[in-house]
């Protein structure tokens, strides 16, 4: 006679054979698996999603009012931008202080009118100064051209004489402007110092 353990092993072997030979069909609805074979256990994939919210049906009149309010708001912003289109953003460094505007009468000087002879003399002086600066500019340009031409001619002659010397001559001199900066690469910590959390307050004006 077979013992209980032998009967159990024989039954499990028959179940495994039957489960391997039986065919089953699977119906999947929203990743929920329904199997016709009770001996097969399957799990569906986990979807992290919430059920769709039911859309509320709004009154068409309410939707129309919302669109009208949105349209009026945009038109108001457009009108504001058009009204301030030519107003530039003020620069505090260039703006005249109010104190100087109030002291304008005190600071103003009453100068005597300039005579026609003085105006003519000033105009001639301005023209003479313009001619002098023009001649100075032309002489500087001519001098720079002569220096550059002489330098290029000397380099060409040096290249004909020796290619190695020419390559050394056109190298950039790293020591032409010597600069050295020495200092600690890392600031040492202060013993017993507790770093406080700082607050940033933006005080810039909004235009």
Image: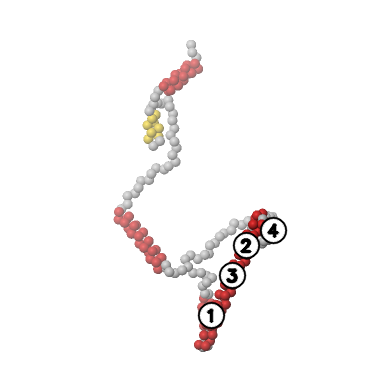
3 and 4 marks in contact (CB < 8 Å): no
Residue visible at 59% across and 70% down in the picture? 142
Check if mark 2's residue and mark 3's residue have beta carbons within 8 Å: no
Residue 153's label in the rendered image is: 2
Q: How far apart are marks 2 and 3 (CA)?
A: 16 Å
Q: How crowded is mark 4: few (under 14 residues within 10 Å), some or many (20 or more)?
A: few
Q: Position of residue 50 (x, y in %)?
A: 41, 43
Residue 182's disc is 4
Q: Name the residue under label 3.
A: 142
Earlier residue among tags 2 and 1: 1
For the residues bearing labels 4 and 1, Cβ distance under 8 angstroms = no
Query: Which badge, 4 or 1, comes first in the chain's sequence?
Result: 1
Q: Do the residues labelled 2 and 1 touch (CB within 8 Å)?
A: no
Discs 3/1, front: 3
For discs 4 and 1, the disc positioned in front in the rendered view: 1
Q: Which label's residue is closer to the chain start, 3 or 4? A: 3
Secondary structure state at the residue bearing disc 4: loop
Give me the C-alpha separation between circle 4 and circle 2: 42 Å
Q: Nearer the viewer, mark 2 or mark 1?
A: 2
For the residues labelled 2 and 1, the Cα–Cα distance comes to: 39 Å
In this rendering, the label closer to the viewer, 2 or 3: 2
Residue at 38% in and 64% down: 78
Q: Distance between the residues labelled 4 and 1?
A: 53 Å
Across and down, in percent, residue 155 comes to 64, 60
Label 1, on which residue?
127
Front: mark 4 or 2 = 2
Figure quadrant of residue 40: top left
Point out the tag, 4 or 2, that comes first from the N-terminus: 2
Q: Looking at the picture, how far across and down is residue 74, in whole percent?
A: 37, 61
Q: In this view, does 49 lie above or below 103?
A: above
> Dot 1: within a 10 Å radius of its alpha carbon, few (fewer than 14), some, or many (20 or more) residues?
few
């Amino acid at each position: 006679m077979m013992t209980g353990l032998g009967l159990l092993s024989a039954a499990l072997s028959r179940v495994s054979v039957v489960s391997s030979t039986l065919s089953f069909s699977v119906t999947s609805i929203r990743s929920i698996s329904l199997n016709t074979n009770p001996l097969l256990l399957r799990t569906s994939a986990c979807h992290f999603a919430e059920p769709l919210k039911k859309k509320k049906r709004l009154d068409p009149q309410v939707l129309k009012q919302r669109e009208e309010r949105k349209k009026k708001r945009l038109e108001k912003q457009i009108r504001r931008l058009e009204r301030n289109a030519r107003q530039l953003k003020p620069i505090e460094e260039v703006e005249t202080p109010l104190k100087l505007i109030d002291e304008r009468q005190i600071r103003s000087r009453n100068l005597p009118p300039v005579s026609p002879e003085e105006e003519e003399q000033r105009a001639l002086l301005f023209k003479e100064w313009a001619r002098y600066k023009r001649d100075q500019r032309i002489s500087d340009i001519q001098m720079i051209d002569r220096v550059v031409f002489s330098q290029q001619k000397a380099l060409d002659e040096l290249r004909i004489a020796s290619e190695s010397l020419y390559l050394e001559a056109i190298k950039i001199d790293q020591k032409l402007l010597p600069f050295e900066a020495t200092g600690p690469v890392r600031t040492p910590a202060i013993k017993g110092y507790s770093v406080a959390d700082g607050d940033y307050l933006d005080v810039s004006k909004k235009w």
